[in-house]
Image: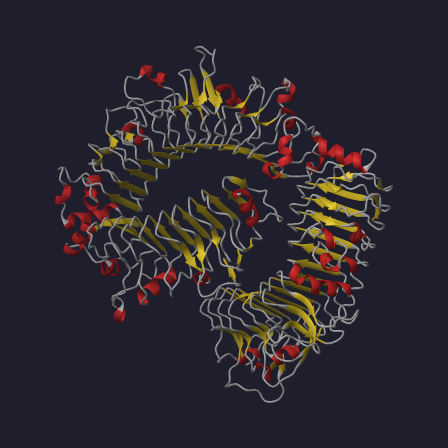
Amino acid sequence: MIWDNKIAVDSFPKLKTLCVVDCNKLVSVVCSFILRRLLSLESLNARSCGLLEVVFELQTLNHLDGHPIPLPLKELTVLSLPKLKCIWDKELYHQFKFQCLHSIRISRCESLTSLFPTLVARDLIQLEELEINECGIVEIIENEEGLVPRFVFPMLTSLKLKYLRELKCLYTGTHTSHWPALKTLKEHRCDKVEILASHSKNEMPLDKLPLFLIEKGAFPNLQELKLDLSERMEIWHGHFHDGEFFCKLSLLKLCHLSQESSISTCRFVESLTNLEELVVCESYLEDPSSNAEAIEGTIHEMKVILPFSRYVRHLQTLDVSHCDGLSKMFTPTIIKNLVAVTKLKISNCRILTEVINDEKGGEGCVVAFNQLKYMEVDGLTRLRSFSSSRYTLMFPLLEDIIVTRCPNMKFFSQGPIEASKLKRVQVSKEVWFWAGNLNITIQNMFEEMGTLAGVKKMLLSEFPELIGKWHNELNPIKSYWQLKSMVVDKCSSFINAIPSRLMLVLDNLSFLQVRDCKLLEEIFDLEGLEAMESTQVLPKLYELNLANLPKLRRLWNKDLQELICFDSLQTLILYNCSNLGHAFASSMAQCLANLVRMEIKECGRMEEVIVEEEGQGNVVEKITFPKLDRITLECLPNLTCFLSRKNHMLECPKLQVLSIAHCPKMRSLTGQSQMENDHSTPSLFTSQVQCPKLEMMVLSHMDNLSKIWSDSPQETLTFDNLRKVQVQNCKSLENVFPHWVATSLTQLNKLKVESCGIEEIVTSGNETPHSNTTQDLFPELNSLVLRDMPQLKNFCTNLPTLNWPFLKKLRVTHCDKANMLSFVASMSNLAKKDDQQGLSDQEANSLYERDFPNLERFLLVDNNIQMIQNGNFSEDIFGKLKALTLACFHDENAVFPLKFLLERFQNLQSLEVFCSCFEDIFLDEGFIDNGKHPVLESLRELKLNKLHNLKSAWREGSLVLKILQSITTFEVWDCPCLTTIFPTVTSFKNLTTLVVKNSSGLVHLVTASMVINLVHLNYMTIIGCERMKEIVANDRDREGKVISFGNLYRLTLQNLPNLECFSSIPSCIFRFPSLWLIKVEECPKMKTFSKGLSTPELENVSLFRYKWDSFWGEDDDLNTTIQKLSA
């Protein structure tokens, strides 16, 4: 609790603001006895308290004499309280009144089923704003038997109800309500509300309740009404008379309007005599021509875009957006009723081909928009014209028209157009077109791609008709183009991606991706460009990304490459370009002076990255990338070198990261002929390669690599900044470091060597000027991992003692000739014989304490534990360890050593269980009885890795419950028999990071009921789980609920061949209020994300190698985009 009942009477007399945040043991905020003292409190904010059940709690032992105390509280905010059952104790009104409350905001309280007790609601005479979001509320005011109340909120001006999936009504009993000051009412995704409002005297169906049961004149000042009809809600039920209920309503917004709700919608709109603005969005509406015989009939008019179009004579603004299924918008009959419309906006209707549909016998008639002053059409990718009929269109007052993202609009109308005041067609605030009249202007814009002039991002596959004229018919005007991001994709007939005349207008282009064009041979067509022009193309191009281009042979087709300077290019990515023999010629490197990142993957024919040009002879050329920071080469089966030929030098003065993987033919960064003066085996680094700032090197699956460095010292080679080295699966490698290199690596702090055939890490070699027999090797080393090297005998033979005072992590597995504890002796050079298993317990104990004073992460295998348990090791030898790996329990009957763990590692913060045959871990077998052993209360990280027999990570019990409460990071790698990773009752309430990789037994990751506990989860990564079909599975009837990942910031889903969606729960909304980055790759069956989705903060998106690093906007929808890309 925050306070107890011993607080003095005069405590906190001036306290005005109280905030309670992340107090996960609190059950209540303010008890009644303390409320008497908070007589200045004006604002209370309670949020993110996992166990909080009540805000204002009544204490029955403390009754007041006399009248209830009026409290000055004005603002109440309650957020993210998953266990909250009530805000006010029902009987609290006998002691206090909350009549000063002005603002109430309640959000993400899943257990809250009602908001106000009846008598509290009656006291809210000054309440001005009420917002309820994502709660389990069924009724806003709690029903009390025997009462027939009349609720009046005399000062309430704004009421917002969002994502209340259980809400049915204001009050379940008989009542009336009155809202005299209400101006704004917004309802969104309250799916169980079947009727918005009805008069209290109207006869109601027994199985339906209106949200508002009202009396005459209940909403006398309501001006703005925004409703999500959920394709079924009735706005009004029963008899309705003009002006009785919504007499001042001027703005009406309707989402998810459908045929089912159209009749009641008609009746409602018919009564709105002051309606000025109507917005219809996200509605699947029928084509006016879908029933030709009934065009004039009332029934059909209830099916078309404006089923209530006969009743909108007062309408001034009409906004229609995201209404799919509609290919035409109006008929002339409908337009005759739009007599007062001054503003018309139509946007993002995917199949709309024209605005006005032809009617029988209508040829030659006049269609007049007499009051229209402003028109905007945007994102109508299939729109061909405003009207294809020969009507006479009249716009006597039209002054402003905006046409954007309508690339297939060839003309405005086939008939005459009268628009005397119109003098321009805008495509943005700064850019406009005019050619004397509207039709000619639209035709010119079509030819010059004018409707795309204001567009900042383009996915070319969305514009099929544009693809056909990409190379021949387009005449774009440079000053009009504002494209910043462009993807040329699925263009099966393209031989090149960007014709020269387009290159000249893409001055603002910063991101270019070309992908999935099966015949494409080159990216840029430079034909027709003069030398002066070629230096001015793509001046702001920041990233060039090429993917899935099986015929690509080169980037451009003319010898102007010496004159082209991509001065802004920082990122070059080549992926799955199987016909590409090299990335570019040596002369082109000069044009990439600002390149920072180079990534080349899965290009099957590539033999070298930079190829020498013909005719250079014996000229020595230095190729410099002055700003290159990172090189990644991966899955290049024919790559032999980075730089070909002997006469080139490669200089990367700022290169920090070099990663090469699955390049089996590569032996050196430079061509083989450079070894003329070195009769030994070629090495990866030679004197022709300079990268003095290299900090990280990763080499993996390089079958032909025998040496990383040459045996002889190279005066010009320096690696003083190298901090991390990782070498894996290099079967031909002789050693990792020659001694002359090892002595120079004074900054090396992480070393990992796995699955190599080497016998020693550092080879001694001959004495050289670089060697120093008294110099310690790797004095800054803090992490050493050696794995799967059966031939490894020593770290370094015949060299001085290795002294690593900063070593925190030591891990040696499957290196049979260099066992972990005896490895201590090898490093200390105390055991001279080959068989080091003779190391005594006392020696190992002494060496451990002396040589590893700061060791935090250690690895123990099965026989090590037996040695420790049977030997003379002190009880607290591992007392300082913060991280432990238990590994190599290969006996099929192996039992997880829980008792050993609890006895020896009291301060453990991180635990990894690796490469063992355990079927169960963390079995609760009474080890915590009577407090005999601690229960790993400090454990924060848990990793399960390569446990191929593991069927259950834990069983329910008090031990598991205590351990899981503290875990913040949980990783599961390569556990194929594991079918669930979350217990059914307990949970990871403090989990922030979740990583699951290569665990084929998982069909789903988590159930919907478990998500409620993942309130702190920030990072989720799921990779390589081949059977997984969805991430969140249904349980306990979660349909129609809101499920929130409130703090999830990054989400990665990769290489999941059977994943169909994030979740298939019907009618369920998934909220990701903090999600900033999402990456979905190699998920071929994924067609949608979830049924309902909210991602307000999403900015960084990568889907199937499509990228929107900074171009994901408010109008972008993750579900729609996934559906489109997977089609």
Q: Position of residue 977 (x, y in %)?
A: 31, 52
* Identity of the residue drawn at 43% across and 18% down: 648
Is 50 situated above or below 741?
Answer: below
| Way the structure is coloured | secondary structure
* Identity of the residue drawn at 30% across and 46% down: 809
Q: Quadrant of residue 523?
A: top right
Is 603 situated above or below 1056?
Answer: above
Q: Position of residue 378 (x, y in %)?
A: 70, 44
Q: Position of residue 710 (x, y in %)?
A: 31, 24
Q: Quadrant of residue 675?
A: top left
Q: Is residue 876 left or right of residue 67?
A: left
Q: Quadrant of residue 987?
A: bottom left
| Of residues 786 and 603, the one drawn nearer to the viewer in this rendering | 603
| Of residues 722 and 110, the one drawn nearer to the viewer in this rendering | 110
Is 1113 situated above or below 959?
Answer: above
* Identity of the residue drawn at 52% across and 21% down: 588
Q: Residue furthest front?
A: 293
Q: Position of residue 161 (x, y in %)?
A: 62, 65
Residue 433 visible from this viewpoint: no
| Of residues 286 and 850, the one drawn nearer to the viewer in this rendering | 286
Is 306 situated above or below 543?
Answer: below
Q: Residue furthest bottom?
A: 65
Q: How many marks?
A: 0
* Identity of the residue drawn at 81% across and 47% down: 361
Q: Is residue 321 left or right of residue 786?
A: right
Residue 145 visible from this viewpoint: yes
